[in-house]
Image (cartoon, grey):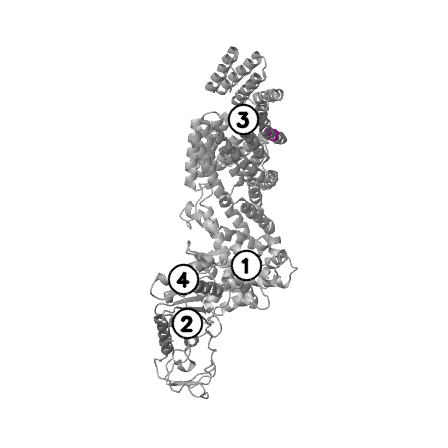
Amino acid sequence: MGAKKTSGKRKSGGKKNRRPGQGQRTGSSFAGASFERSQVLGSGTQTTKINVQAYAAVPTALNSLPGLPQEFTGRDDEIAKILSILDPGSGSGAAVGSVAGLPGVGKTTLAHAVGHAALDKGWFTKVQMVNLRGYDPTPVPPEDALEALLRALGVAAEHIPPTLDEREGLYRSQLDALRREEDRVLILADNASTSDQIRPLLPARHHAVLVTSRHTLPGLGARLFNLHPLQPDAAVDLLHQRLEVADPDDRRVEDEPAAAEELAALCGYLPLALQIAAALLADDPDQPLSERVRLLTDAGTRLGGLDDGERNLRAVFDECLTRLSHQEADLYRLLGLHPGPDISTPAVAALTGQPADKITPVLRQLVRARLLTQNSQARDRWSMHDLLRVHAQEQARTTMERDRVPRRRFEQARARLADHYVRHAEAAHTHIRPAGEAVSTLFGGREQALAWFDAERENLLATAHTYARTQTALRLGFALGRYLEWRRRIQDLLTVRSQALEACQALGDTANLGGAWNNLGNALGELRRYAEAYDAHQTALALYQKSGNTQGQAKAWNSLGTDLGNLDRYAEAHDAHQTALALHQQSDDPHGEASAWNNLGVALGELDRYAEAHDAHQTALALYQQTGDTHGEANAWNNLGVALGNLDRYAEAHDAHQTALALFQQTDDTHSQANAWDNLGVALGQMDRYAEAHDAHQTALALHQQSDDTHSQANAWDNLGSVLRELKRYAEAHDAHQTALALYQKSDDTQGQAKAWNNLGVALGNLDRYAEAHDAHQTALALHEQAGDTHSQAIAWNNLGTACRGVERYTEAIAAGEKAVAMLTGHEDWRRSGEAWAELATTLSASGAEPTRVREAWEQSAIAYTRAGDDEAATTSRTNIENSQAGTPSGT
């Protein structure tokens, strides 16, 4: 060992058999001892002679690492990162790392694992551990930590000097002696609370120190490592391994995987909480995981359910508060009033009633204490670990129950926070509602308003839930609706609309009751619950009629028209929109009139009255432009493009959809952009620009996936499959239609399923899988018959005839073809009639039918195409007439 020479003179001798007296210690306690020219332990004051009273016992520095628990898991990445700074090849100076994390996250066990890994690599000859008890009532002062380390390094007790400076000097000399002997020591300084506890323990070079703390200790010049809770898979693995240690035959995690995942989530993926839960389960081997989950599901009892008699998570969190200042602890409790998962600095300012610049330093102190996390991307947002949030809520409740004064103060804080969210939500709403009304100056424009809504969505929903059946829920229900529809958060939309209705009913607010029912109906319609939507709008209409609200009646009629169209009752839908239009005109509401014209155009299109639909959308477009409603104008352009496509004016349809897309991009409406891309793809396909159509549908699909809109994704997949068929990529087309079918089934859209089955059958026919194609078209036909859609039935009959021809079942093929041409002619769908006659002619020719029947079918095909204005297709059919007369095989 190196020299034991001290840097200062001792007052008394150091013989081991000397009786305890002045200048000596008994064991590791300084009680009753006296030093001349010494430093009082923990006070930092210099004296000439001071009697030291009872103090914390000197800690023990361990020469060997404890073994890792068998369930230790999920920390490979963290270990690798810390080892990277301990590698002796990483530099000549001392390696210093600091691991920070909230209580129970596993900092100490991670430090042990790093120590074992570093020893296994041969980087250190020994590891010394010292527990600084930084969060105990009496933390270990640095001089006591140094004494423990010096003893562990082989310095005899009588040679350890009394002062901090002297001990620090001796400690460094001991480490330097070890360096000369090519020994390298890793110091694990566990559970530090301040940099002052650590700074004297830092070696000058060669050796390494790894610190664990609940706080970030920036003054050490250490590499900082923030330790987070486990990943979900690792948390479940910890549960499994801990139960297996207690009983190798315990199969509960394998038997209840979903419950195991939920239990891990309820424990916040926090190792200490998981270990406590596992211990409780091990103590009750017959308890199913699902029962333990139920016990922890109630936030009011969750922390109480994480107490195994030896470890108590609530007590750990309670102890954290004792280290906070009064202002910090008060803010922690106030944050327990917040109902959402994170909070912005302005919201904290509203909660506390203090300016943001005054409260931000206190928030940062809670971050340092690992009781709060600052968002690394959005620096003005803060969040708590789930279990800490439960603890803060408990603390808030306890404070409010303590006395009338704190209860009133906390209730006022909660009211300020709710008012903050309501005022800002209503202000943001003014930037995304139809143009023509004043907008709030709280936001600089639509983009800023949408960004605020995006950031606060979960908090707003939680606030509405917390304040159910109150004015807060009512106002938020009205303010949030258009945003949630914009972002396609339709389930959330239904929730807030329902809460607004309940609040209206609870408050007796008849003025808003009709609007609440109308809004609820719109949300139900978005979820494809059309019959319920219809009933809700009927209720709204009756309320508006009772109150004599003409504008409200117009809105209800417009909504009813949409419901009727969704229920395939197109004639009634047309009449409802006509009624809405007249009422909007009566009340001089140009925006409502534009909406009615737009919806009327959709109904006319469904009735195959394409020219009238075109004119209706043109009128809507002009009104939207007149009112300055960019979003409404974009909708009108999109619908106008559909009408133009139905009129075979494909280039104009393409341009209309391009215009709609550009306007939707201006308004930051991702869902509507996706719809415009999809419609643009259809127009490009109609123009035989299939590669561009493919890319447009791919873009639409990607945008719909962003908003998690299952039904719209199904539409995009189905359209993509149709384009892939045109590109002769039949296998990919088959897969696209299969995907569309699954998504339509998921969204319970019978019509969509029928369409997908029909297209899937076409793809199977392209792959010469005619028997499967036949079955697909049969399924499509049955679904269309169930819906009473005769036009789609005709298309399915035509495709079924083609599939029957593929398997040489000519009698059935001819019968199916004849049924198709009759139905399509009845619908005056001349283009598809031309296609169906051509298919029938091909089937007749293949079956060996009389040439006159074949020629007649081709003639009918040419006539139908001519009536559709498709001269090129008509010419092809006439060519086939000539070929059939000459005996040349015909084809389509």
- Residue 238: numbered disc: 1
Image: 791 above or below 703: above
Residue 122, quarter of picture: bottom left
The 10 Å Cα crowd at callout 3, few under 14, some 14 to 19, many 20 or more, is some
> Which secondary structure lies at badge 3?
loop
Image vertical order of residue 282 relative to residue 457, above or below: below
Q: Label 2 to label 4, Cα distance in Å?
A: 17 Å
Query: In the rendered structure, which amino acid carries the disc numbered 3?
Result: Asp
Of labels 1 and 2, earlier in sequence is: 2
Q: Dot 1 lies on which element?
A: helix
* Residue 192 seen in this snapshot: no
Q: Tell me the mark number nearer the camera, choosing from 3 and 2.
A: 2
Q: Are marks 3 and 2 in contact (CB under 8 Å)?
A: no
Q: CA distance from mark 1 to mark 2?
A: 33 Å
Disc 4 target residue: 224
Q: Sequence order check: which comes first, mark 4 or mark 3?
A: 4
Q: Is residue 734 left or right of residue 205?
A: right
Q: Residue at x 43, y 63 (%)?
A: 118
Mark 4 residue type:
Leu
> Camera-side residue: 84 or 222?
84
Residue named by callout 2: 197
Which residues make up the magenta segment? 777-781
State the CA–CA distance, disc 4 to disc 1: 26 Å
Numbered disc in front, either 4 or 1: 1
Magenta: main secondary structure: helix
- 669 or 859: which is nearer to us? 859
Specify whether residue 416 is in view: yes
Q: Viewer-nearest of labels 3 and 1?
A: 1
Labels 2 and 4 touching (C-beta < 8 A): no
The image position of residue 705, as x and y in percent, is: 49, 42
The amino acid type of the residue labelled 1 equals Leu
